[in-house]
């Protein structure tokens, strides 16, 4: 069907639009100037029915329709105006509290009103309400031992280096006296803040026994390389070995006494085969003293059971406990279970043709399942309550606690604690700061890093991150390197803290914020933190 050139009900070329506007202006001038109220264009409709301030409806002039079939006429579209091209309604997104977006309808304003409110809406965005994520001010308690921390921040970390002699002395003194200086939420100039530098030196201190300046005594598992080529005068001297073990027994007994009196929050026993974490009552969500041993072997578990030490394997499922055969209540396969497992043979009538496994095969199968746990995370053992005291005596008298051969022969386990104990030596973690340039896209940005090495205790990690929050204005990230055998120390214990079982923990010698974090049951299971990130004073982490 042929139409007049340039016609379209939905689109007009600019030149034609301008022509239509001029013609409409002349038409309006004729309507309001005519005494009778009729326009000069011959538009239908009486003008006396319309107010003088409102232009009457005019469909426009007729188009010539010489080529149209049927002899009809066609008028121009009166609504094909450039001012009528905007959509009457728009959809915009509203972010709910849970972060999900939903569509809502918003009536679009006219161009005049839109221009008036443009300045007020530019700052808020075009119909989008900002979503603020929840602020997480704490990360989960991590009971694993760390060997290295690497923090990075866009702000300089040079304040942590080169402490003055007075700042270092004051920091160590505050550590011994368990005195803590409060710091503001944000520091404008961390390098000139003496309180911050003293608190950082205080957070690096820990206590250790035994202490040999020429040998690093942590870690002890798979640490033969650390002892290679080093002088070990006790290796062939039985008298010296007995002297070292006697002093070690006094130190570990002192630690347990402090733990029981709630004057020490926790301590670690690091041997060449396994690590033991002792925690005071009220920490880790437990209402009693607890101890976790990892990794363990079948021989160690049987020796503990022979000494009357009750323990559990918290990472084993209930069915796997029976197969492990380590505990008296869950031990082995019994005859009734074996007879029941072969009842289907009787139903088939072939019970006499199939030879049932004898007791020797059953015992071998049980021992095989128990041995399969050895040196695995699932072999972690939990001891609670008064049995922890029996465990201390067991460790003191256990001959396999000390290596009989090799580079660590005759050397007692390493004891680590955040507070002083008898026979302990104060050590400090090593810290150094480096400024580097990191490539971000096509540009390079200045990144400051802080590296801390040594046996990093849970309370030390929390104290350092607390200082970084204030010094770095709530923006930093950290990579945490875990001593692998201690990753399962986050396993929850069975005796949880009751509602009325709160105890006084003020004598632990730790910051109140660190005590509050360590009181909570760990949610990490058999894993440990590997990364933490703080952005605008809110934590995220990976494990």
Image: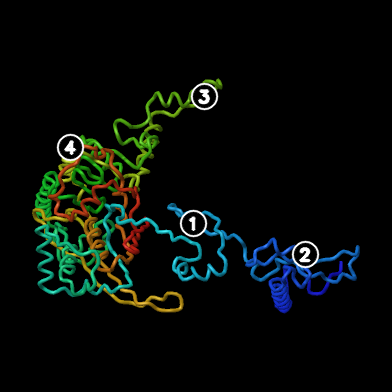
Which dot, 3 or 4, sits closer to the camera?
4
Q: Quadrant of residue 7?
A: bottom right
Query: Residue 392, image x and y in percent?
Result: 16, 44
Query: Residue 510, image x and y in percent?
Result: 17, 55
Mark 1 Cα shell of 10 Å, populated few (<14), some (14-19), many (≥20): some
Seen as rendered, the residue at the extreme front is 35
Find numbered disc 2 in the image and state the secondary structure of the residue it sits on: loop
Which dot, 1 or 2, sits closer to the camera?
2
Query: Residue 296, image x and y in percent?
Result: 29, 46
Identify the residue at image location x=31%, y=62%. Answer: 537
Label 1 or label 2, whichever comes before in sequence order: 2
The C terminus, quarter of image: bottom left
Which dot, 2 or 4, sits closer to the camera?
2
Residue topped by disc 3: 344
Please report contact status of discs 3 and 4: CB closer than 8 Å, yes or no.
Answer: no
Mark 4 Cα shell of 10 Å, populated few (<14), some (14-19), many (≥20): few
Residue topped by disc 4: 386
Residue topped by disc 1: 94
Please report contact status of discs 1 and 2: CB closer than 8 Å, yes or no.
Answer: no
Label 4 or label 1, whichever comes before in sequence order: 1
Kindly report the distance in space between the C-alpha atoms of the residues bearing marks 1 and 2: 48 Å
Which dot, 3 or 2, sits closer to the camera?
2
Which dot, 4 or 1, sits closer to the camera?
1
Please report contact status of discs 3 and 2: CB closer than 8 Å, yes or no.
Answer: no
Which dot, 3 or 1, sits closer to the camera?
1
Find numbered disc 1 in the image and state the secondary structure of the residue it sits on: strand
Kindly report the distance in space between the C-alpha atoms of the residues bearing marks 2 and 4: 105 Å
């Amino acid at each position: 069907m042929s139409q007049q050139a340039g016609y379209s009900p939905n689109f007009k070329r600019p030149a034609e639009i301008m022509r239509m506007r001029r013609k409409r202006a002349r038409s309006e001038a004729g309507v309001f100037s005519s005494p009778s109220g009729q326009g000069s264009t011959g538009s239908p409709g009486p003008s006396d029915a319309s107010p003088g301030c409102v232009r009457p409806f005019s469909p426009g002039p007729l188009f010539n329709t010489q080529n149209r079939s049927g002899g009809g006429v066609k008028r121009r579209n009166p609504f094909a105006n450039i001012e009528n091209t905007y959509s009457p309604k728009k959809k915009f997104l509203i972010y709910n509290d849970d972060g999900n977006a939903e569509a809502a309808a918003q009536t679009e304003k006219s161009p005049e009103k839109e221009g008036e409110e443009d300045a007020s809406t530019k700052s808020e965005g075009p119909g989008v309400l900002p979503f603020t994520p929840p602020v997480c001010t704490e990360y989960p308690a991590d009971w694993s031992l760390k060997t290295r921390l690497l923090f990075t921040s866009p702000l300089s970390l040079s304040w942590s280096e080169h402490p003055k002699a007075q700042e270092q002395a004051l920091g160590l003194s505050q550590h011994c006296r368990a005195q803590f200086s409060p710091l503001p939420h944000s520091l404008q100039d961390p390098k000139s803040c003496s309180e911050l530098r003293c608190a950082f030196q205080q957070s690096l201190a820990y206590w250790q026994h035994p202490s040999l300046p020429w040998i690093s005594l942590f870690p002890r598992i798979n640490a033969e390389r650390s002892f290679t080529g080093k002088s070990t005068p006790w290796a062939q001297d039985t008298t010296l070995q007995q002297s070292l073990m006697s002093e070690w027994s006094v130190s570990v007994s002192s630690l347990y006494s402090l733990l029981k009196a709630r004057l020490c929050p926790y301590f670690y026993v690091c041997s060449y085969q396994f690590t033991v974490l002792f925690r005071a009552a009220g920490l880790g969500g437990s209402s009693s003293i607890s101890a976790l041993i990892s990794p363990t072997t079948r021989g160690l578990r049987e020796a503990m059971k022979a000494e009357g030490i009750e323990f559990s394997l918290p990472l084993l499922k209930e069915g796997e406990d029976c197969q492990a055969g380590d505990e008296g209540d869950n031990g082995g396969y019994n005859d009734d279970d074996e007879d029941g497992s072969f009842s289907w043979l009787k139903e088939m009538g072939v019970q006499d043709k199939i030879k049932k496994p004898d007791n020797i095969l059953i015992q071998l199968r049980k021992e095989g399942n128990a041995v399969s746990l050895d040196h695995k995370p699932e072999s972690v053992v939990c001891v609670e309550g008064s049995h922890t005291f029996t465990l201390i005596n067991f460790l003191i008298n256990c001959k396999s606690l000390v290596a009989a051969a090799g580079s660590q022969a005759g050397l007692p386990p390493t004891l680590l604690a955040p507070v002083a104990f008898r026979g302990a030596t104060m050590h400090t973690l090593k810290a150094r700061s480096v400024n580097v340039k990191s490539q971000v896209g096509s540009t390079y940005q200045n990144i400051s890093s802080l590296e801390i090495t040594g046996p990093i205790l849970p309370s030390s990690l929390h104290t350092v991150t607390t200082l970084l929050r204030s010094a770095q204005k709530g923006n930093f990230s950290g990579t945490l390197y875990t001593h692998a055998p201690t990753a399962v120390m986050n396993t929850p214990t069975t005796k949880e803290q009751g509602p009325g079982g709160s105890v006084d923990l003020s004598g632990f010698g730790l910051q109140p914020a660190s005590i509050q974090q360590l009181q909570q049951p760990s949610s990490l299971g058999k894993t440990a933190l590997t990364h933490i990130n703080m952005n605008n004073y809110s934590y995220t982490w990976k494990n």
